[in-house]
Amino acid sequence: MGLAPRPAVLLICCLNMNRRQFLVSSSAMAAAAPMAAQVTGVSDPRSDYKPGKAVMVVGCQRGPTNEFMLKLWKRSGVDDICGSIPVGPKGHWEPEDIQKVSELCGKFGVKLMMAEINGLSSAYIGRARNASIMMGKSPERDRAIDDVCMSLRAAAKAGLPAVKYNMTVLGVLSSGRVPGRGGASAREWDLSKAKQDPPLTEAGPSMGAAMWERITYFLDRVIPVANEYKVRMACHPHDPGVPPTGFRGVDRVLGTVDGLKKFVSIQESPYHGLNFCQGTVSEMLQDPGKEILDVIRHFGQRKKIFNVHFRNIRGKRDKFVETYPDEGDVNFYKAIKVYKEVGYPYMMMPDHMPGHPDDPGTHQAFSFAYGYIKALIQAMQNEG
């Protein structure tokens, strides 16, 4: 099932341009040539936000999106998810790819509200599907960006309102695991223990200017398409931040609050925002318990939060341990009151839960977190 042909497309085809040239040209003309198919299931973040009201929902981003997981989520009170949609042989989604997953979710009373687009995950650059984007390697990155744009069009046509993505080189850094309650273990990051080995990644030296160029190059081409087709794009911060001098030759520019502020300002679009990982943002701060509330308020008041990883830590920048939601330095009751204050309307999902050998897949840990988050949401709703 493809998009209806446009006059510009017919002209390009007559000129025998190749597929990649067509995609770049059609992206540039998007504003002048709206998609013929009906766009459904999308909304404007500016109208979704309801300041002073608890309209958020518990969600999840775990995979795979199959019958086992859908039943588990439903039993845990999760009705909205970020699902897994396969990227086909063409290198991008087709509307039917999304519709198939959405229909499967619907059989179990679950709504597909978001998906990770084109493998732009938190994986280390050496394992990333579209590594060329963050390596700044053209023309490969142009082809990868074209595919992202095609997936956005498919999302709009299939009624998928939002996508998430990462713009990372290092992936998620860890210095090991430490014991937690009940015999569980949790991820630790201690910069003083971390080894920069090898000294550079496959991306080579990737300091501030280079990182911002690669990020801006992507946003300048993709966000106008997201804006036209009304699909929210939620970017995850760098986890964790590192010193400005870099780690393995990489300056994690999305590893500070100021960096995130700069990021959302690069394109003025209501569909350009954050997959706001509260745990990762807490890792950027010297006193997370006090500072995180104003950070939530800053981005929430500007309607730039499109998804929340409601995760807790114990510690501070450069030295922290991930925890269960009820035992970290951030008071989740105070935090969710700020989400209510700004009227945040989307998913609140657990992330990076501690693990235990008796809990394969961390299903017990996540079920605890779903219930904890749902209870907080209900408390906010009952407060009026």
Image (cartoon, rainbow, N blue to C red):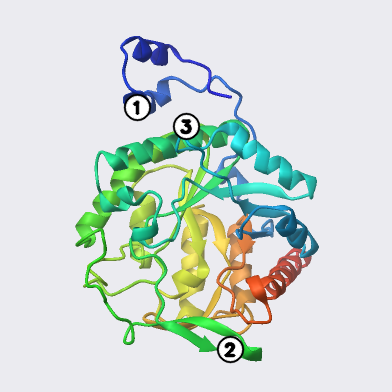
Sequence order check, earlier mark of 3 and 2: 2
Question: Pointer 2: what residue?
Answer: 180
Question: Pointer 1: what residue?
Answer: 28
Pinpoint residue 96: horizontal percent, then vertical percent.
62, 33
Q: Are marks 3 and 2 in contact (CB under 8 Å)?
A: no
Q: Is residue 273 above or below residue 208?
A: above
Pinpoint residue 179: horizontal percent, then vertical percent.
55, 90
Q: Residue at x 34, y 37 (%)?
A: 143
The quadrant in which residue 349 appears is bottom right
Looking at the image, residue 233 sits to the left or right of residue 378; the answer is left
Q: Is residue 48 visible?
A: yes
Q: Are marks 2 and 1 in contact (CB under 8 Å)?
A: no
Q: Residues within 10 Å of mark 2 (few under 14, many from 20)?
A: some
Looking at the image, residue 53 sits to the left or right of residue 92; the answer is right
Give the Cα separation between the discs numbered 3 and 2: 47 Å
Q: Residues within 10 Å of mark 3 (few under 14, many from 20)?
A: some
Q: Residue at x 74, y 53 (%)?
A: 67
**Of labels 1 and 3, the one closer to you:** 1
The three-letter code of the residue at mark 1 reads Ala
The three-letter code of the residue at mark 3 reads Glu
Q: Residue at x 71, y 71 (%)?
A: 367
Q: Residue at x 47, y 59 (%)?
A: 299
Question: Pointer 3: what residue?
Answer: 228
Q: Is residue 286 above or below residue 66?
A: below
